[in-house]
Amino acid sequence: MNTRTSARLRARSPLRSVVAAAAATGLALAGAVALAAAPASAAPASAATAAPTAAAAAPAPYCPPPGEMPGIGNVPAYTDSNVAVFAGGDYLATGSSAESEGLLLVHGDAVFDKANGGVFNVGTVGVGSGIVPPGGSTMLAVGGDITVRPTTSVHVGANLDGGGAVAAGGSATGSFDTNGATLTLDLGRAAAMAPNADFQSVVTDTATTLGALPATGTTSIAFGRATFTGTPGEAMQVFDVDGAALASIVEVSFEGIPAGVPILVNVSGGTVSFAPNYFLLNGERVDAFSSPNFGNAASRILWNVTDATSLLLGGSSQFMGSVLAPTATTEVTASTNGRLHVGGDLRYSGVGNEHHNYPWTGGGSLGCGGGFSAAKLVTGGGASMVPADTIFTLAYEYELAGGPVAGTLALRADGTVANGPQGLPAGTVVRLSEVDLPAVPGVEWGAATISPDVVTIASGEVVHVTVTNTANSNSPSAVGGFSVAKALGGEASALVPDDTEYTVQYRYELDGESVTGKLTVRADGVAVDGPQGLPVGTVVEFTEIDLPEIDGVEWGTPVFSPETVTVADGASARVTVTNTATDAPVVPTPIGPAPGTPGSETGLASTGVQAIVPVLVAAILVAAGVTALVVRRRRTA
């Protein structure tokens, strides 16, 4: 997998800048996966500490139907691949916030920093609706970087068969427990968020469409209570309320609401602060866990905060219903029950607050299911030669609103579940095909089997598709090897005898162990075989050691072509190592014996010339003396 730096697609907010600085100084922490820097991917891991105590669950592969939404419990019971929580900016879990159930999708960066440390659960939670993504699928998808601060650990997909995968467009630091699923980094924003890369536009469009619906009921505000009175016969109960009026509200009452229909409250105003702690539906209190209609009430209500730039969901109670806020920077201290889709930064900062995943029965992007997921299965005698991170491409196409829709899913060879589009209308027919099979050395692919290859979307159901590929070996042996030959270059290459020997060292991994060896090659260019029975896919590296000494020759840096060899089935790859021979610098030869040898105190050779030197010196000195005497006499004359 290629490592890429995620492009920042919008200007950073102050919170984003703080998060980026934090990510740059992240520390490695103890846990199932502790990251101090961002590798391209981290292997699946089971919990080393704080492992789930309950047996892994396998929930039903569909959403609960409207009217049968579960109450609060601690067992994953239903499957939902739609986005539960979305932050169009950065995401911060701090204070003593505890859990986020369902798929958590973040466009920017995500930071988990509990004030007193401990575990923050994502995907599945200790106590929640039990409506969770499929086991092994992505439950935390972040377009930017993920930072888990010291003493905090993020657990994903706990108590769920297959655990929960994590995908990041950038890096990740800190402690993660994916409960056996994958943690994949440096994907780039679009790939990390796929198939929800454009979810911000989905949130905006949905909010605009719902915000344009006319009110069907009446709203009254008095004595700290907001009362929404419905109208019989309407398929959706729609209300309008001024966001400024909600600041004083502690009780919410929905009255005269027909059974089973969804409820939409369009909230106006630029700044909204709302901290209710008591919810009534047709006279019954529904925000207490003891209420048999807790889940049904939460799944029916949607608060559409159409144009606020600042939203606070305060208090420490159970906030009932989904929240749609396409332009708001949002802070949450209450526990939320529904979907939570906000366009700006999202800060979860309460005391033990949790997000419980309840799809909105009004459907669309806030609804449940109506989609498919897919995973790859590689079989055949060559399956072991296929790297786990090999990517296969599954294409899908269907019609929506009278027009064609097409796209692709990236499926990993390790079987990680990928979610296709969710929230599709019941009856939508999706056709699937596999395109552009990856090239894997030593492998020849058989025909792909897609089961099923046509999916008919049913309300609330997520259909799982298995794409099976048979990997066949290109030959019965499935082995190969390499040979090495010498080549010379440079102006001094003619000085090198053909029988000059060079030592090439090679290294490769075999059955998890490092193997090294040496080959002796000659300057005449005759190739020498290395090991020939290496498994296909083995990567061999080379170095040259102990270059020979040749008079008049200075060696340049050896160049291997290719630098490494990946063993192919039945083939012996030729490697050429080229040495450049240049003329060695000429060093002057000293005259005579070295200093201190007999016959010379100055280091000059003991020759006739040396014997004459004292005589010459004496003559020069005498001549100088005579000259000086003549000059002196002239001056005194």
Image (tube, rainbow, N blue to C red):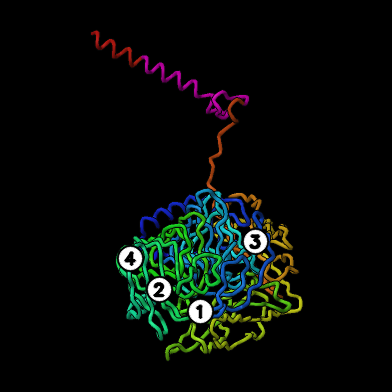
Foreground pick, 97 / 105: 97
Quadrant location of residue 600?
A: top right
- Measure the C-alpha gap from mark 3 to mark 1: 28 Å
Mark 4 vs mark 2, foreground winner is 4
Horizontal side, residue 400 vs residue 502: left or right? left
- Residue 225 to residue 618: above or below: below
> Does dot 3 land on a helix, a strand or a loop?
loop
Q: Residue type at mark 2: give it.
A: Val
Please tell me which residue is depicted at 53% across the width and 45% down the height of the picture.
Answer: 586
Where 580 sits versus 135, above or below? above
Q: Earlier in the sequence, mark 2 or mark 1?
A: 2
Residue 161 lies in the magenta-colored region: no
What is the span of residues highlighted in magenta in the rendered image? 597-625
Q: Amino acid at mark 3?
A: Ala
Q: Which residue is mark 2?
A: 203
- The span from disc 3 to disc 4 (Cα, nearest Å) is 54 Å
Q: Is residue 189 visible?
A: no
Q: For the residues marked 2 and 1, what is the alpha-carbon distance in whole angstroms?
A: 14 Å
Q: Which residue is mark 1?
A: 422
Residue 222's disc number:
4
Which of pointers 2 and 3 lies earlier in the amino acid sequence? 3
From the viewer's perspective, is the residue at label 3 or at label 4 nearer?
4
Residue 45 numbered tag: 3
Three-letter amino acid code of the residue under disc 1: Gln
